[in-house]
Image (tube, helix red, strand yellow):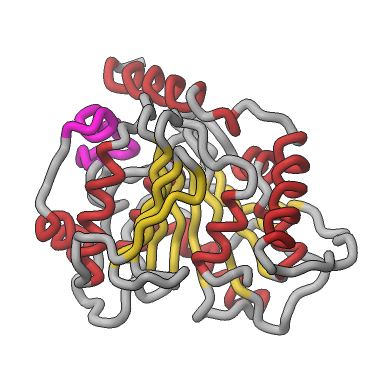
Amino acid sequence: MSRQRRRFAAAAARLARATPVGRAGGWLRRAATAVAVALSVLAGGVTSASPASAATLTLVDNFGHNPTNLQMYEYVPAKLPRHPAVLVVAHWCTGSGPDVYHNTEFASLADRYGFIVVYPSITGDIKCWDVASDAALKHDGSSDPAGVMSMVRWEIAKRGANQHRVYMTGISSGAMLTNVMLADYPDVFKAGSAFMGVPYHCFYTGTFRGWNSDCSTGNITKTPQEWGDLARAAHPGHTGRRPRIQLWHGTQDEALDHHNLGEEVKQWTNVHGVGQTPVFTDQPQPNWTRTRYGDAGTQPPVEANSFQGYGHELPKPGMALLALRFMGLAP
């Protein structure tokens, strides 16, 4: 094993150990779902559950262009609208599509609110998403993002999914991929929610699934204009709307430093052309600071959630529901 690969594997292992969902059992999904339902009722959301779904996680073969040999898993609830929305959920380092399916509440929430969930899964020996290479950091490139995009196109073509209602979320390495997908495909994704990620291009090394220690430790700082220019360069021909983004991070994150939250805010506020000063700030809980940029409503261009004293341990139960509400998948 090369020195770079050993270094990457060690860093990925630390990142995975720091992510509780990476070693949680199915109990987390059940507990999270119960909390999410309670929060929904208390907040005036849906008060009656849909009938139990007979849906299961399914492996899809031959879904299209797949340069890095990813696997595609999908969860299709028994009850859907005619042209359902699609949510892509990306796993953490060393995780898999089935891992994130079993250990998060997105599938049970899909039963309730009626949308398809796609769980992409890495098959190689380095199970962190490629957010570091030139091929990954451009529209219609030839790395992981291209394979994930093929999954979305398959859902639109084969399931009749709504091409105007495509969303992305991810945890840790999956949150990094969320930033990348929203930059690479702003014409496809309507909104995204990134749990403990880094800005688009922060992890750049020029190598396939490379590890950027300067980024992970919070030692990369750029101006809003510099970050925004990098994101816009991912798809230079795009002149239309840009996807909204919601960001989550703990202040004591030792795997991906909290500094990256501020850099993400710089990037996406610049991309959206809104100010760096929040137009709305509140504290839903004593250790939780939520800021919104460009709009004080519940679906602003950019929202940041910072958790005092939290490590690399998000999402907590109930947060997936809040992510769905931000994206527009739940009332």
Position in image of residue 100 (x %, y %)? 62, 42
Residue appearing at x 74%, y 52% in the figure: 57
Position in image of residue 11 (x %, y %)? 37, 22
Question: Front-most of 281 and 330?
Answer: 281
Does the magenta segment cover residue 217? Answer: yes
Q: Is residue 129 visible?
A: no
Horizontal placement of 221 versus 242: left or right? Answer: left
Q: How many marks?
A: 0
Using the image, determine if residue 205 lies above or below residue 170.
above
Horizontal placement of 162 versus 294: left or right? Answer: right
Residue appearing at x 71%, y 84% in the figure: 82
Using the image, determine if residue 66 lies above or below residue 187.
above
Does the magenta segment cover residue 310? Answer: no
In the figure, residue 266 lies in which quadrant? bottom left
Position in image of residue 161 (x %, y %)? 62, 77
Position in image of residue 281 (x %, y %)? 35, 57
Question: Front-most of 114 and 99?
Answer: 114
Figure quadrant of the C terminus: bottom right
Magenta stretch: give its range: 203-219
Question: Front-most of 228 and 185?
Answer: 228
Residue appearing at x 33%, y 45% in the figure: 131
Residue appearing at x 37%, y 27% in the figure: 252
State whether the magenta stretch is mostly helix, strand or loop: loop
Q: Is residue 258 visible?
A: yes
Figure quadrant of the N terminus: top left
